[in-house]
């Protein structure tokens, strides 16, 4: 089965509702193909929720939206045991987490207990209610949003949970001409038109098979590991560092407290293959690795206070690392 027509039909269908935001659309499709989870960060009104809902519509998968709030309880997410008076026993009432596509809206507004329950679902594909563990439906995707400008009543996501997100996308404002197109679209439409189911489960499996078939040269696999490894301050042996001497000379490590884990190497490897698939190639190049490095790594490194003092964000640090790591 040809994959490019499938990708083009998905992009076209999503573009009927989401004007612009091509990077977000490709990021959502990449996450869907990779079988991971995605974190969308942007100010309100940038079509984050609409894009996630539209993605569920074109696949025909079961969709549930969960509005995260400070008073949310784990049972509100996973479900709970309910006493049945007539039967004299407890029965399980499953929560909204039992769906294929989960929109965790404003995820950073929920407290630690709720984040812990979500973490089990994202990593183990299961939830525990009472003393019983229940498997979640397959496929299962968590697409979370958070607002970067409101911090009152929010909780910073734990690093362990952030590491479970395949990508973190920063959603930007649309171009003026795209915003004009939005106005024209709204003016001529009273109701939101339904989207066709252009991506079936069998088509998704075909895309995943095609992504798995993308060739990765051993030198590029080593390059991926070098990029991720460059975010870590290597131990000193024999008076010299094992790796990252050039980066150390540039003073990058003073900006990083903790680097990315091996899970980041796996994510970068998978996403580089899918990016090559998007470009219509059967092999990856260094440009594929660089194209996905920022969304894969930006939420997986912890910067130091010195980075904040110098006005550097994760993207700036990662970009400097990419410019310093030798390309095969």
Image (spheres, rainbow, N blue to C red):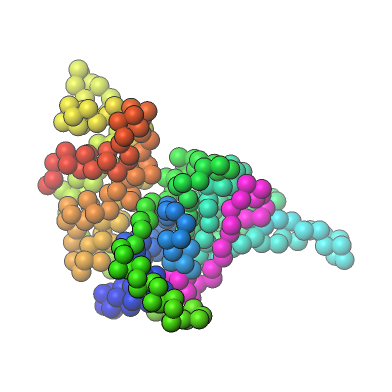
**Which residue appears at 32% of the width and 40% of the height?**
314
Please, is residue 281 above or below residue 124 in the view? below
Q: Quadrant of residue 80?
A: bottom right
Lateral position of residue 170 relative to residue 130, left or right: left
Quarter of the image that includes the N terminus: bottom left
Residue placed most toward the observer, 283 or 196: 196
Residue 61 on the magenta segment: yes
Residue 147 appearing in the image: yes
Q: Is residue 15 magenta?
A: no
The image quadrant that residue 90 belongs to is bottom right
Residue at (56% x, 63% y) in the render = 65
Name the spot of residue 52 as percent of width and height, x first.
46, 65
User: Percent from the top left, x then y, of residue 46?
Assistant: 42, 61
The residue that appears at 33% across and 45% down in the rendered structure is 297
Q: Which residues are magenta?
A: 54-77
Q: Residue at x 87, y 66 (%)?
A: 86
**Where is residue 7 drawn, in percent x and y?**
31, 73
**Vertical placement of 138 versus 250: above or below?**
below
Vertical order, 315 against 88 (above or below): above
* Above or below: residue 14 compared with residue 303: below
Percent x, y of residue 307:
32, 31
Residue 138 appearing in the image? no
Q: Which quadrant of the structure image shows residue 248?
A: top left
- Please indicate whether residue 81 sits to the left or right of residue 222 in the image: right
């Amino acid at each position: 089965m040809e994959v490019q027509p499938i990708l083009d039909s998905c992009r076209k269908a999503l573009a009927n509702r989401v004007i612009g935001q091509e990077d977000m659309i490709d990021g959502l499709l990449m996450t869907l193909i990779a079988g991971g989870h995605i974190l969308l960060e942007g100010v309100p009104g940038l079509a984050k929720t609409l894009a996630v809902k539209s993605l569920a519509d074109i696949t025909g998968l079961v969709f549930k939206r969960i509005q995260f709030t400070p008073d949310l309880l784990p049972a509100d997410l996973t479900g709970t045991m309910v006493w049945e008076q007539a039967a004299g026993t407890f029965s399980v009432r499953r929560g909204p987490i039992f769906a294929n596509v989960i929109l965790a809206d404003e995820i950073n507004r929920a407290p630690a207990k709720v984040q812990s329950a979500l973490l089990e679902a994202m990593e183990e594909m299961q939830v525990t209610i009472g003393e019983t563990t229940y498997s979640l439906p397959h496929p299962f995707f968590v697409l979370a949003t958070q607002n970067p400008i409101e911090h009152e009543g929010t909780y910073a996501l734990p690093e362990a949970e952030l590491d479970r997100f395949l990508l973190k996308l920063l959603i930007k404002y649309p171009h003026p001409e795209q915003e004009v197109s939005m106005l024209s679209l709204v003016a001529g439409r009273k109701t939101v038109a339904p989207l066709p189911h252009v991506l079936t489960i069998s088509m998704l499996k075909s895309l995943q098979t095609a992504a798995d078939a993308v060739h990765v040269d051993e030198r590029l696999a080593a390059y991926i590991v070098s990029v991720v490894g460059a975010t870590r301050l290597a131990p000193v042996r024999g008076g010299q560092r094992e790796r990252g001497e050039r980066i150390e000379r540039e003073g990058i490590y003073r900006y990083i407290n903790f680097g990315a884990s091996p899970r980041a190497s796996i994510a970068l490897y998978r996403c580089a293959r899918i990016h090559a698939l998007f470009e219509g190639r059967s092999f990856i190049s260094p440009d594929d690795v660089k194209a996905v490095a920022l969304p894969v790594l930006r939420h997986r490194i912890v910067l130091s206070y010195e980075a904040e003092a110098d006005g550097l964000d994760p993207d700036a640090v990662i970009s400097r690392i990419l410019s310093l790591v030798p390309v095969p």
